[in-house]
Image (cartoon, helix red, strand yellow):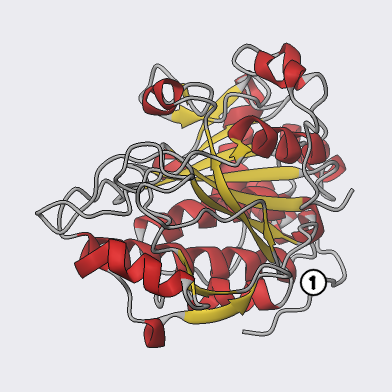
Amino acid sequence: MNIAKKSSRRSFLNLGAGAAAALGLSDVLAPLARAASMSGRACVCIYLIGGNDSNNMVVPLDSPAYEVYAGARGPLALPKSSLLPVDSGGSGRFGFHPNLPGLRDLYNQNALAILANVGQPSMAANHTGASQLRYLPNGYLAVPWADPVFASMEHGVTMAAPDASGAHAKGLAQAIRAGRSAGNFPDTHFGSRLQVVAQALVSGAAHQPVFLVPLEGFDTHDNQLARQAAAFSILDAGLTAFYQSMHDAGLNDRVTVYTDTEFSRTLVPNPNGGTGHGWGGHQMILGGSVLGGRMYGRFPSHQVGGADDATGTGVWRPSTLDLQYVATIAGWYGKTGLENTPGYEGLRGISPQRLDFMAG
């Protein structure tokens, strides 16, 4: 994959006027046209449900770090020869999971960054999922820091935007369905979810939206190697297709994708070929405004029982707080006063609040 990060913009023309008229969308056509350039910025949270084991998402390649990792991982260790090498931008060589080739390529093109060992302030908060999700009455999940007005979309996707309620939400759904396909997406539930998001963005049908897109399959208490490999293949295909669609539409500078999950998992495996619940883990940030091609934060030592291990089973104490991670994404988006939002009051005692992996 070789995708340039700049291109000319497309717009609301992806939703033809004829299609809008046929659906009786004359009343929403004008406001949608005004939003055609997708004024403002958009965020897409990819929530990896179940607790993603990021110990096998990004693996140290240099000696002796790889040997320490492999010794503690035991049967879950990925062979060094299978890992997809990248340079961290200053702290050594690492390897992406072999089922993440598209995301590795985007990292090498400076479109994707890794934030190492990020997590909740305490293990108690970590296991309750505090401040990470908003649970909606219809069973959907939503980003808690975003605008409180939500619209449920197709396939379990939610969108928060200042204009996402009432008649506009109905018109938005119709506009999305009427629009031309916003790219070539894989034939998976996750691919369908991302296509819905892409069509909403390309149609220009919402101002300053924040989406939550769930991806299941990361609760790997058993048979983790096979289950995580399958989940990573789905993640990789979906996100590379989504980035391509944003590039083709000229929107990638204004759309940032970021991963989140409940927690990472223990480095030491359990007897069932799986892992227990962990704490700090690594996250991916993708988009044209991401200062990619490098790893941010401090990667933990994989020494079981070492200074970074909270339990003696490879549960990493976070070196970067999730509050800083979220504040950086939300600040780029344009959210101000996050420390006054319920669940984020802890930002008042943190310096710096925002990290340096985003431009602008």
At x 40% / y 16%, what residue is drawn?
Answer: 137
Res. 118 visible in picture: yes
Vertical position of residue 63 compared to residue 294: above or below:
below
Image spot of residue 93 (x, y percent) = 59, 76
Q: Residue at x 29, y 46 (%)?
A: 313
Q: Quadrant of the N terminus?
A: bottom right
Residue 230, visible in the rendered structure = no
Q: Residue shown at 49%/78% (left/top)?
A: 63
Image-based side of 175 in relation to 58, left or right = right
**Secondary structure of residue under mark 1:** loop
Q: Amino acid at mark 1?
A: Lys
Viewer-proximal residue among 7 and 112: 112
Residue 154's image quarter? top left
Image location (x, y in percent) of residue 191: 44, 60
Residue sitting at 56 percent across and 71 percent down?
103
Work out which residue is located at the far bottom of the displayed protein and give it.
81
Q: Which residue is mark 1?
A: 5
Q: Residue furthest left?
A: 271
Q: Is residue 158 above or below residue 246?
A: above
